[in-house]
Amino acid sequence: MNDLYRALASVFPKDRITDDEVVLAGYAADSAIAPGSATFPSYAVLPKTTEEITHLLQIADRFRVPVTPMARGSNIAGMTVPVQGGIMADLRLMNRIIEINEDGAYAVIEPGVTFHDLYKELKKAGFFCHLPTAAGGSSPLANYLMRPSGNFSAKWDPDPILSLEVVTPQAGIIKTGSASFETAGWRARYHCFPDLTGLFTNSYGTLGIVTKGSVKIFDRGEEERLVLTTFDSFPPALEYMKRIIRRNVAESVTFWTWGWSMFHEMMLSKSEKMPEEMLKPDQKTPPPGVPFGIASARLSGYKEVVNAQETVCIKVARELGGDHLDNREARERYPGCYNYLHSYFVEGVLPKPGEESQIRAGLHLPGCLLTAEPSKLIEIEKFMWDLAQREFKPPYFFRALPYSHGREFFFAFVVYVTGSLIEEREYLQRLKGIYGTLYRDLLRNYGGVMFRYRKDPTFFGMTGMYGELLRRIKKLVDPNNIMNPGMLLF
Ligand SMILES: Cc1cc2nc3c(=O)[nH]c(=O)nc-3n(C[C@H](O)[C@H](O)[C@H](O)COP(=O)(O)OP(=O)(O)OC[C@H]3O[C@@H](n4cnc5c(N)ncnc54)[C@H](O)[C@@H]3O)c2cc1C
């Protein structure tokens, strides 16, 4: 290890490389991997440039040492925990917003830029970025590379990535999209050859380190508005989302069951105590006076158009048995919920509590996340409630939102684990076991696809030549499998 340290120290100054166990311990756990159960990395480095990353990967490759890239570390699935040890490449200092191109409606950013950073700069320019309902301290680039959920632009497409710069252990630096041509700039994902940006999406740091990327940005419009609709059950809410997205009435829409509303009230009150109703045994039926769920739609554009869109949203909701919830009434009756949804959908601020460090310290929200065709979602909802009643402890709830013009939907069934990690270790273990077989059942029975890879190589094994081709590409760019091998993808 001394030789490795010497090699790293030839690239990084002392204050950007550490083997301090106290620091390393922070990288060795997250809400999916309990402290003490994963190997510590040997070193953590804080690169600042593409050149440093290139040297880092060359050194790691020479020493055959795993490298785990981490942007902000707020994923909740152990994706940046270096379970096989090695070097943590903590990218938080690569935090430059390189360009906000208002003419081409894109921004070029580094992986350490946070949603808070980007949102603030974009707002000044009259733009916003694609927002997942994640934490504001997480990285847009890392999030977009994993296909974000909770996005603004459900209407057209959920994929905000354009061009990338990626450093690989043995294939050097690769630029994708329009940036692959020296003079074409960063504006486009596609040109006249096959799309290689897509190769690096959902690769979870197993093929290389993305050092910069261009992402789509969206005009905020003259008017931005939140339209809320309550529904008594899921099927009409699903139909509502499908219609208003496919008919271009709203920019995005999400459906949240009542548990979320209570959760958002809890966030506003800053209470650590969960309301009794949230823990009631029958989670499917809301407490008296509380709607089963709320659909939140974002409208933006010219005021006259937004007025008309709002009228149509209300009409569609009525046709389906939903009730329009006036913003003023929502603010009075459900202030936490209103605050959260307004902040997210209209202001464009991610209001979740805590930055990445707090999140890594132990918030347990294991979720079952998948995408499926609209018709299958009703069956999946029923299946999940039945499963929850048998296996999960309250509280649990779900949200759903359309993708790709309402062709498929994202469905996240979340079990909020209330006790401490120590107290709940056994329960979390049991949940993990359940999710282990659950995703296979959901795929087999409903065609529901795991939204983010959960370290189960059998899924890759089901993809035939697709998987084989990727394995060959992997051999080309990272033959020694040093890139995030703990993901168990390759
Ligand atoms: C409370 C909470 C709520 C959340 N809700 C949502 C949600 O609604 N929607 C959603 O999409 N996500 C959600 N998440 C998940 C997570 O916050 C996001 O996915 C987050 O944006 C990921 O960004 P990050 O900077 O934390 O990535 P990291 O955790 O640092 O990295 C994620 C993965 O990408 C890889 N990676 C990171 N940077 C690079 C790079 N430069 N090059 C190559 N590989 C890289 C890592 O190795 C890892 O595999 C939530 C998380 C929490 C804690």
Image (spheres, rainbow, N blue to C red):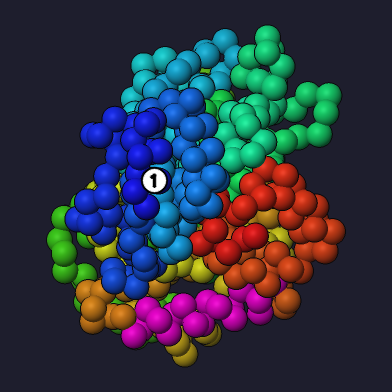
Answer yes or no: disc 1 within 8 Å of ligand 1. no
Q: Quadrant of the C terminus?
A: bottom right
| Residue 243 location (% of width, % of height) | 66, 48
Query: Could you tell me which residue is drawn at 81 percent across and 34 percent down?
Result: 194
Magenta span includes 345: no
Residue 35 in view in this figure: yes
Main secondary structure found in the magenta portion: helix
SS at mark 1 in the image: helix
Residue farthest to the bottom, as pictured: 390
Residue 266: percent from left, percent from top: 22, 60
Please report the residue visible at 61 percent of the width from the left and 29 percent of the height from the top: 173
The foreground one among 57 and 166 is 57
Classed neighbour count for the residue bearing mark 1: other residues with Cα under 10 Å, few (<14), some (14–19), many (≥20): few
Residue stretch rendered in magenta on the structure: 426-443
Where residue 117 sits, quadrant-wise, is top left
Residue at point 37% right, 31% down? 10
Q: Is residue 332 above or below residue 433?
A: above
Residue type (three-letter) at the residue carrying disc 1: Asp
Across and down, in percent, residue 27 comes to 32, 55
> In this rendering, is residue 349 above or below 84?
above
| Mark 1 lies on residue | 3
